[in-house]
Image: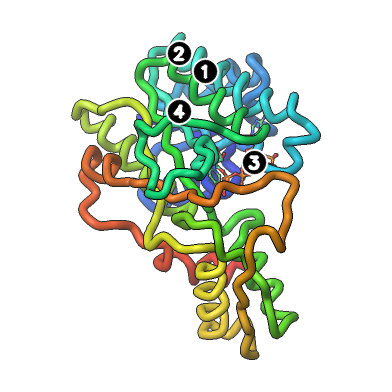
Amino acid sequence: MRILVAGGQGQVGSALAQQGIEQGLDLVALGRADLDICSEESIAAAFDKYQPDLLINAAAYTAVDKAESEPELAYAINETATALLADACAARDIPMLHISTDYVFDGTKDSPYVETDPVNPIAVYAKSKEAGERALRERLERHIILRTSWVFGLQGNNFVKTMVRLAKDRDRLTVVADQFGGPSSARGIADALLTIAAQYQSGSKVAWGTYHYCQKPYVSWHEFAQAVVARAIVLGLVDHEVEVAPIPSSEFPTPVVRPENSRLDSSLFQAEFNIPHTQRWSKDLSDVILASR
Ligand SMILES: NC(=O)c1ccc[n+]([C@@H]2O[C@H](COP(=O)([O-])OP(=O)(O)OC[C@H]3O[C@@H](n4cnc5c(N)ncnc54)[C@H](OP(=O)(O)O)[C@@H]3O)[C@@H](O)[C@H]2O)c1
């Protein structure tokens, strides 16, 4: 079975590429230059060349704050291009695995979100991702939408790398303590997607649809930062004590207000795809911290 990955140079896309190599899979991960998901011609050319049996879309517009000033581009990539990919998969009768976000929820629920909770995206990025979910559902029956949160990977920038960079130069960091979620390593998300792909390849029935995937334990950004800095000290990347002080999000204003509750309940995904153990974010943390060198 050949797997084609769009967005192959992003955090999750490059983790998929790496997993493909490590697991000896027939997996081709293409960056934007070789597969521009906004272009029907580029999609057709990549499908013709690689003849995939399954598509994973790891490409997206992910600049949450910037999306407010370029909504057309955010929708073009997160909604219209998702529809183009879904149409291409439908025409070739292959399934598509797609990644979405906890931001489809407004964060006001007081417990972890399950798949059946009503969505209520609150800004352009979130709305464009939610529109992409609908576009895929409307076009392709055999799809998976995997909603995840707080992604950190080896490639690109993320919260973990930012905390390490700041901790190297400072004695004190202030970090938001009133937003909660499940940090999720790009590698773990790639594993989750490839577990679904493997089930499809084995010929077992796949329960297509929408699933939540995040790693545990749930933490605040402040607690996550404390763990990152402590690990960076153990790994020798930070050579001094750093105070990590909690602040309310009102003291760290961003153009787009983040949901207070980003916690996703992954139990349906675990049950459906036979994942015996809860995945923990601490497992891949050291590799990403070391990649911050
Ligand atoms: N990051 C998070 O914390 C987070 C949280 C929840 C959900 N998610 C979701 O998880 C998925 C993966 O996120 P990520 O963190 O891996 O994102 P990322 O690192 O920003 O990677 C996205 C990739 O998509 C590519 N891309 C953008 N437009 C494209 C186009 N027209 N054609 C082809 N490729 C294009 C980008 O390429 P360029 O570099 O060339 O633009 C980039 O390599 C996304 O669906 C995102 O919405 C992310």
Q: Is residue 52 found left or right of 229 in the rendered image?
A: left
Q: Are marks 1 and 2 in contact (CB under 8 Å)?
A: yes
Taking 48 as reference, is 145 left or right?
A: left
Q: Earlier in the sequence, mark 4 or mark 1?
A: 4
Q: How many marks?
A: 4
Local secondary structure at mark 1: helix
Up the image or down, 285 lies above or below 123; here it is below
| Ligand 1 sits in quadrant | top right
Query: Disc 4 designates what residue?
Result: 55
Choose the circle earlier in sequence order: 1 or 3. Answer: 3
In the image, taking residue 227 as reference, residue 128 lies left or right, namely right
Residue to which mark 1 is pinned: 135
- Residue annotated with mark 3: 62
Label 4 CA crowd tier, 10 Å (few <14, some 14–19, many 20+):
many
Task: Tell me the amino acid under the disc marked 3.
Answer: Thr
Residue farthest along the top direction in this orientation: 91
- Residue type, label 2: Glu
Of the 4 image quadrants, the one containing the N terminus is: top left
* Mark 1 vs 3: CB contact within 8 A: no
Looking at marks 4 and 3 on the same chain, the residue that comes earlier in the sequence is marked by 4
* In front of the other: 51 or 182: 182
Seen in the picture, residue 81 relative to 24 is either above or below; the reply is: above
